[in-house]
């Protein structure tokens, strides 16, 4: 059995997943992802399974991988880089790991928020360079947090926002009234209402045809001047050029993102030098606690699927 392993945090972080993988009678080939479609096409055809991160697994990659490919096990929850309709048509199970990183990503979201509102990144860098730059920041207490997507991560963000004495409003088409009542989260009727009434907007929705480019010039215009936008979901949800324009004009007071539309970004990516912008390199779920959970779950999914027994969290309904 030959397995392609591409996720870097899986490979780099110690934990019991390494021993479990070593105990399998598999030939493991390691690559440093995320891999482009071109690289995946070079590799496709020689593997029984992919244990992947955010690699480009397109229809062409899947078709070239057949007939040998039996299963794709995603390390994480985002499936937007995998052609799910093609996997369903070609009957290749796609596995994923819901419920393993919501705490970690929610904490990272608040790290970005505090980094922006307290100027932590700017002033810490200045101090390291010998400058005593004493900028004036803002409190987040009594501000309104608007959450787009009240799933597992969005809920954890809401809990932390309430702990910081923020008001919380949210939009999600699949509303959990029990959670909202327990944590004093107010449901608004549309995403636009959340955008118009928030001091901080935090994005926690999946990337889809409906959400791609969702935060663009027209939507930003609806928001409060000085709004802070946080994105620990997918970079493509935000139109980069429109965000840069809004940051430069002051319409957006700060943008904190763990994701970009191109990863890794080119050196001249405009958000890397935009004002009041904090970008981290997609590490929101990369902690010593979360990585082993994701790794064990994705590996256990793969083992169970190949054996044809046990739970394996299939995302595309093929199993």
Image (cartoon, helix red, strand yellow):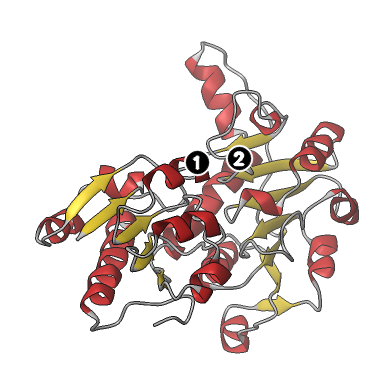
Of the two numbered discs 1 and 2 on the same chain, state the one appearing first in sequence. Answer: 1
The crowding category of the residue bearing disc 2, from other C-alpha atoms within 10 Å (few below 14, some 14 to 19, many at least 20), is few
**Please, is residue 186 above or below residue 237 in the view?**
below
- Residue 236's tag is none
257 sits to left or right of 218: left
Q: Secondary structure at mark 2?
A: loop
Residue 293 location, quadrant:
bottom left
Q: Residue at x 57, y 53 (%)?
A: 232
**Please, is residue 14 above or below residue 290 in the view?**
above
Q: Depth check: 75 or 156 in front?
A: 75
Q: Residue at x 12, y 62 (%)?
A: 24
Let me know if residue 118 appears in the view.
Answer: no
Q: Nearer the viewer, mark 1 or mark 2?
A: 1
Q: Position of residue 26 (x, y in %)?
A: 15, 58
Q: Quadrant of the N terminus?
A: bottom left
Q: Secondary structure at mark 1?
A: helix
Q: Residue at x 66, y 29 (%)?
A: 269
Q: Position of residue 194 (x, y in %)?
A: 79, 67
The crowding category of the residue bearing disc 1, from other C-alpha atoms within 10 Å (few below 14, some 14 to 19, many at least 20), is few
Let me know if residue 302 appears in the view.
Answer: yes
- Measure the alpha-carbon separation of dots 1 and 2: 16 Å
Q: Depth check: 200 or 279 in front?
A: 279
- Residue 262's tag is 2
Q: Quadrant of the C terminus?
A: bottom left
Q: Residue at x 66, y 64 (%)?
A: 208
Residue 170 location, quadrant:
bottom right
Residue position marked by numbered label 1 in the rendering: 38
Residue 175 location, quadrant:
bottom right
Q: Position of residue 213 (x, y in %)?
A: 76, 54
145 sits to left or right of 29: right
């Amino acid at each position: 059995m030959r397995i392609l392993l591409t996720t870097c945090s899986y490979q780099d972080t110690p934990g019991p997943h390494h021993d479990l993988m070593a105990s399998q009678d598999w030939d493991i080939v390691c690559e440093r992802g995320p891999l482009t479609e071109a690289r995946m096409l070079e590799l496709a055809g020689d593997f029984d399974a992919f244990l992947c991160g955010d690699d480009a697994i397109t229809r062409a990659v899947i078709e070239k991988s057949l007939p040998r490919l039996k299963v794709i096990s995603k390390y994480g929850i985002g499936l937007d880089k995998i052609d799910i309709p093609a996997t369903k048509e070609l009957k290749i199970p796609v596995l994923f790991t819901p419920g393993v990183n919501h705490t970690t990503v929610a904490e990272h979201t608040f790290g970005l928020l505090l980094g922006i509102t307290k100027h932590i990144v700017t002033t810490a860098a200045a101090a390291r360079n010998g400058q005593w730059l004493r900028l004036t920041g803002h409190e987040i207490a009594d501000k309104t947090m608007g959450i787009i997507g009240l799933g597992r991560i969005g809920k954890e963000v809401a809990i932390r926002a309430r702990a910081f004495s923020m008001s919380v409003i949210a939009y999600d088409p699949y509303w959990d009234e029990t959670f909202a009542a327990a944590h004093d989260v107010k449901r608004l009727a549309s995403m636009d209402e959340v955008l118009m009434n928030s001091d901080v907007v935090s994005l926690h929705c999946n990337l889809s045809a409906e959400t791609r480019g969702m935060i663009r010039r027209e939507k930003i215009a609806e928001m409060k001047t000085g709004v802070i936008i946080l994105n620990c979901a997918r970079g493509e949800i935000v139109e980069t050029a429109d965000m840069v324009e809004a940051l430069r004009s002051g319409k957006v007071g700060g943008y904190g993102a763990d994701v970009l539309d191109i990863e890794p970004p080119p050196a001249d990516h405009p958000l890397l030098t935009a004002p009041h912008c904090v970008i981290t390199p997609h590490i929101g779920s990369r902690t010593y606690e979360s990585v082993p959970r994701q790794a064990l779950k994705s590996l256990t999914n793969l083992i169970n699927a190949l054996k044809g027994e046990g739970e394996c969290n299939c995302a595309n309904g093929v199993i």
